[in-house]
Image (spheres, coloured by chain):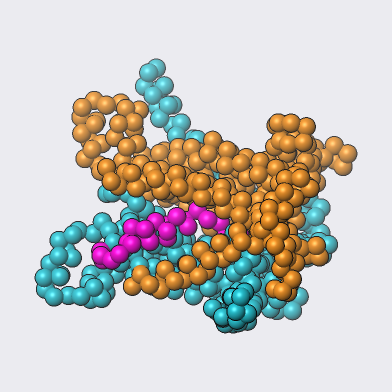
Amino acid sequence: MVGIPTFLHVMLIWVPAILSIGLSFTNWNGFKLSKISWRGIGNYKQIVTVFEKDFYEALLNNLWVLVFLFLFATPMGMFIAYLLDKNLKGTAIYQSLLYFPVVLSLAVVGFIWKSVIYSPRQGVLNTLLGRTDPGNQIDWLGNSDFVIGLTENYGLSRNFLALIAPMMWQHVGYIMVLYLAGLKSVDPSLREAAAIDGAGEWQTFRRIIAPSLRPVNVVIMVITVITGLRVYDIIDVLNNPIGTNVLSLLVTESTSGESSNVGRGSAYAAILLALCFGFVIWYLRSTFKEDDA
Amino acid sequence: MTARLYKFLQGIPTGLLWVFVVIWTLPTFSLFVNSFRSKNAQTARGWWAFPEDDAALGLGNYSDVLASTSAGGLKQGLVNSFAIAVPATIIPIAIAAFAAYGFAWMDFRFRKGLFIATVSLLAIPSQVALIPLLQTYSGGAHFTIPWLEKTITIIPDMSLAGTTTAVWLTHTAFAMPFAIFLLHNYISQLPKDLFESARIDGADHFTIFWKLVVPLSIPVLAAFAIFQFLWTWNDYLIALTMIGANGANHPATIKIASMAGQFGAREHLLSAGAFVQAAVPLMVFFLLQRFFVRGLLAGSVKG
């Protein structure tokens, strides 16, 4: 019973992922297998020297996504779920409307924001700001100046921030639904007991609701991290504007086209894998510890 | 005075929600209006200016985008999307449910280790495996023993590259960790007595699975099905990598993305195209919403 699924994911995920690591130490254009040659850590050296700018920019951008999702989108989704859980009138409508973006493909979402919100000439933002005249237009997706500059070369570019917005737009609805489902499953008698004992809203939340939501929080954590590290579609669809590199984009970019190098692409993939694994190990340790306790 | 203040404070959550809802709906609503406007109108003014357009709102873009010849074959794209999403939804559920049951209620060696190995893949993005996977699909997997100069074929060349089969097969594999995780959470929390009494009555694992576990797990199976369908229907990366330049097999997401290129000649059709593509997931969502919300966390939250 366990055999087929195990075989499937071992063959189609574990083996390729390990092969990726293997290939990252080779030099290969991706066409003839006989042309593979051993390269040692050459690809990694190249990444931190020749492709230094791309690599650190991508790494930092992935990190920005995580930061923004964790600091803004996730708490916002939780907050909305908390409001909705109070059985306000029309909860179903709010819920559907806020969840709506999650149903859309990121490829489509990228286009929606580009054409409707960020368009320099007739976008919502520039119109609201009164900057639609050619000459003083704001080019939301084209301007790669830093909003937050960490060093001279690295920081959070304006257009990447503009791309994080639609990601958050989707993420809030996702978190909201998960959290709402969690809230609904909190034992109502516990809440009643708390109310009878005279617990205030904040106290009830802290002592009763939050502890029973721990499993949901783990799921939300996992989903947020995965989303942050997987970012790809929305940037690729918008033709990868300058300043918006992410790791997964580097993987595919260095393995396609004229100057493709599967070795280097695999090295990027291996780095991505290492990042994910660090998180996975931490996550598994915390969940299995709880199980044993 | 205090009563008034109280009422005001009580109204805040609703007010706040309305603000959220308006902001959250704005992008999609704008796109919706634009999808009915002519090319000239779309490029000339923002969507809110639609009453001043030369041509009235109409279904022109929709008929253009669905015409089989002119619009980059979105129709074919939808067919391909179904060809990917349907098997990529059904197959993972079927096999993951078996595995989840096995991990939860069967004793065998390395159970915990194997389970960890499976679930730890949860956070692995597909990009890390796509390159060798594509290579395997296009040429099979061969292993040459260097000192014997003998080649062993592990996986034969199936010429899958460029086909929708390659896409759903990949989706199936990558769905395993999450599917097993979600279903295991649920199935492992079914009451133990149930299984024990079934055992005493002489039921084997297979009978228990079909007669007990499957009927009891319907909510979580449905939730996963919805989730997986939406995910595979909306996928862009895996399809793009596996199908590559073979336009005949591109799903709707890639067809739409490619409309944005070509020097903007068809960019005005994008809004209609996006809505056509989104119609299926929207229908799935609104029809099965109840299942989705309730079932998705059915197992993760002890209720």
Asked if the stretch drawn in magenta spans residue B288, the answer is: no
Residue B280 in which image quadrant: bottom right
Specify start and end residues of the magenta stretch as a single range. Answer: B105-127
Closer to the camera in the image, A64 or A8:
A8
Residue A118 drawn at (x, y percent):
73, 46
Q: Which residue: 44% across, 32% down?
A: B11
Q: Colour of chain A?
A: orange
Q: Is residue B269 left or right of residue B3?
A: right
B115 is within the stretch colored magenta: yes
Instruction: Please tell me which residue lies in front, B19 or A223.
Output: A223
In the foreground, A252 or A92:
A252
Q: Position of residue B53 (x, y in %)?
A: 77, 55
Q: Residue at x 50, y 53 (%)?
A: B123
Residue B125 is at least partly visible in this image? yes
Q: Is residue A63 left or right of residue B216?
A: right
Q: Is residue B75 visible?
A: no
Q: Residue at x 44, y 26 (%)?
A: B8
Q: Quadrant of residue B81?
A: bottom right
Taking depth in this image into account, of B70 and B232 the one nearest to the observer is B232
Q: Position of residue A194 (x, y in %)?
A: 24, 31
Vertical arrangement, residue B134 with respect to residue A240, above or below: below
Residue farthest toward the front in the current orientation of the protein: B147
Please identify the dominant SS of the magenta region. helix
Q: Is residue A174 shown left or right of residue B275?
A: left
Q: Which chain is cyan?
A: B
Tell me what residue is drawn at x 15 percent, y 70 percent: B199
